Amino acid sequence: MKELFFFFWFSWFFVIIVVFFMEKGFEQRLFLLSLLAIMICKNIQVSIGHLLSMSLSFILLLFCTLLYFAFLRLGLYHFFATYIVIFTYVGILLWYKVSPASFLVQPNVLIPIAIVGITVFLHRTFPIQRATLMLGFVLGQLLFHLILRSYHLEVRLQDESFFILFYVSLLTLLVIQGFIHSVSLIRRRLSSAGR
């Protein structure tokens, strides 16, 4: 019950950020419509044969993320960077699955910090970081569940914990970008005051 609360809380928080703080255009409409559609379709389950059962919100997130990645028209380097993020995410999830790593660091802390750190290290601009993070998370979650399915383990692909990790990672990336812009603004003010 607590996870469902956080899912909707983060969803509405990002709706507010998108509506009031993003520039008007295709990106704002895409993010706003995808956030609202994810919240609406949260409880609708879709089965793909006997292989996979997932929520419609996950499928919408996958579609919107691929659409955003295609909208940015990124090059080969960005695909390799996304590949690195995907396998880092899957590796951390498998590490938590097979070892008692949660005694050391909670996955709600380690996963966003690790994935955002790698994304910021690989890219300089915020839209590309956002696209890489989003696509890495979604495809990584899908790959993780396909790996678990191949070993006949867990088949649940819609739980709120994924969306909470996804939202926390986006929020962490947003805070880092806000900090970077604040530091550059302070530097510009100090350099103009020094003249």
Image (cartoon, helix red, strand yellow):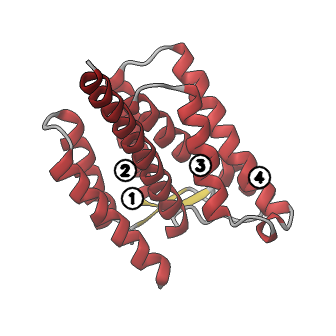
Element type where label 2 sits in the image: helix
Q: Alpha carbon of mark 1 to alpha carbon of mark 3: how far?
A: 13 Å
Relative depth, front residue between 187 and 24: 187
Mark closer to the observer (4, 2) = 2
**As shown in the figure, which amino acid type bears the numbered disc 2?**
Leu
Q: Nearer the viewer, residue 113 or 24?
A: 113
Mark 4–mark 1 CB contact (< 8 Å) = no
Tell me the residue that label 2 is attached to.
60
Q: Earlier in the sequence, mark 4 or mark 2?
A: 2
For residue 150, the mark is 4
Q: Is residue 113 left or right of residue 9?
A: right
Across and down, in percent, residue 181 comes to: 35, 36
Whole-number angstrom distance, CA of label 4 to CA of label 1: 23 Å
Residue that mark 1 sits on: 57
Discs 4, 3 touching: Cβ within 8 Å: no
| Distance from the alpha carbon under mark 4 to that under mark 3 | 12 Å
User: Quick one: SS at disc 1?
Assistant: helix
Alpha carbon separation for disc pair 4 and 2: 24 Å
Could you say which disc has been placed on residue 142 in the image?
A: 3
